[in-house]
Image (cartoon, rainbow, N blue to C red):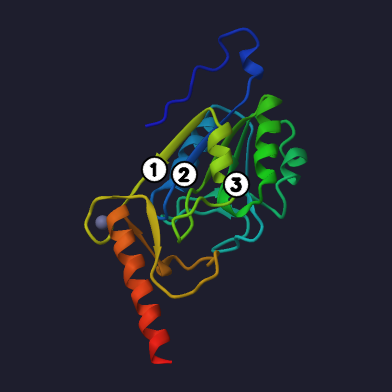
Amino acid sequence: MFIEPRVGTGRDSARRGWIEVVCGSMFSGKTEELIRRLNRAKIARQRVEIFKPALDTRYHAEDVVSHNQNSIRSTPVPVAQEMLLLAAGCDVVGVDEAQFFDESLVDVCVQLANRGTRVIVAGLDMDYMGQPFGPMPALMAVAEFVTKVHAICVCCGELASYSFRVTAAESKILLGETDAYEARCRYCFQEGMREKAAETTSQAELK
Ligand SMILES: [Zn+2]
């Protein structure tokens, strides 16, 4: 389990910020881990603000909602830059569904951390094709702490790092459609992708 580094003991350390990334596949508990960290900061009477991309409107526009209904209030923002103003005076800033922001999120998180804010970013590290997702790889590079959480493969029970899309839809973002995905391990993800490719070929041959 992630334990926060000591805060407020060294010279000027009370004003030092840093970046934490919590990443993994769907159903890996990323948002639950983000909420756990934020709630602990809140209990310590730190000023906490949570943001998510405005395009993610499933369940409730104002809440970061994890799949187990353990929710925490959040502010939807259309662009990452808005966080710089909205987070003024915050000790801790949380960002959920970070993969849906554009690359400018990286610079925003760096600026927040540089001015003394603890930034905790949660997001999918890979898309349904198994490719690095949006600003996540760059965020993992600039972060002090990276935690990769895992789901359980629905096919074989091994640790899962991939979000396998069960449907044939090709858009990168399928909002709120958790039924359209399965958490899979590397082996079962590849098996699934091969089956999909074979289906596409046979359908093309029928036409
Ligand atoms: Zn598997």
Q: Quadrant of residue 83?
A: top right
Spatial CA span between label 1 and label 2: 6 Å
Question: For mark 2, what is the residue?
Answer: 23
Identify residue type, mark 3: Pro
Give the total of numbered labels: 3
Whether residue 48 appears in this view of the structure is yes
First in sequence: mark 1 or mark 2?
2
The numbered dot on residue 135 is 3
At a point 38% along the width and 79% down the height, the residue shown is 201
In this picture, residue 133 sits left or right of residue 52: left
Please tell me whether residue 174 is drawn above or below residue 96 in the rendered image: below
Label 2 sits on a secondary structure element that is strand
Spatial CA span between label 2 and label 3: 12 Å
Circle 3 Cα neighbour tier, 10 Å, few/some/many (<14 / 14–19 / ≥20): some
Question: For mark 1, what is the residue?
Answer: 149
Label 3 sits on a secondary structure element that is loop
First in sequence: mark 2 or mark 3?
2
The x and y percentages for residue 166 are 38, 70
Identify residue type, mark 1: Val
**Which quarter of the rendered image does ligand 1 occupy?**
bottom left
Circle 2 Cα neighbour tier, 10 Å, few/some/many (<14 / 14–19 / ≥20): many
At a point 62% along the width and 59% down the height, the residue shown is 61
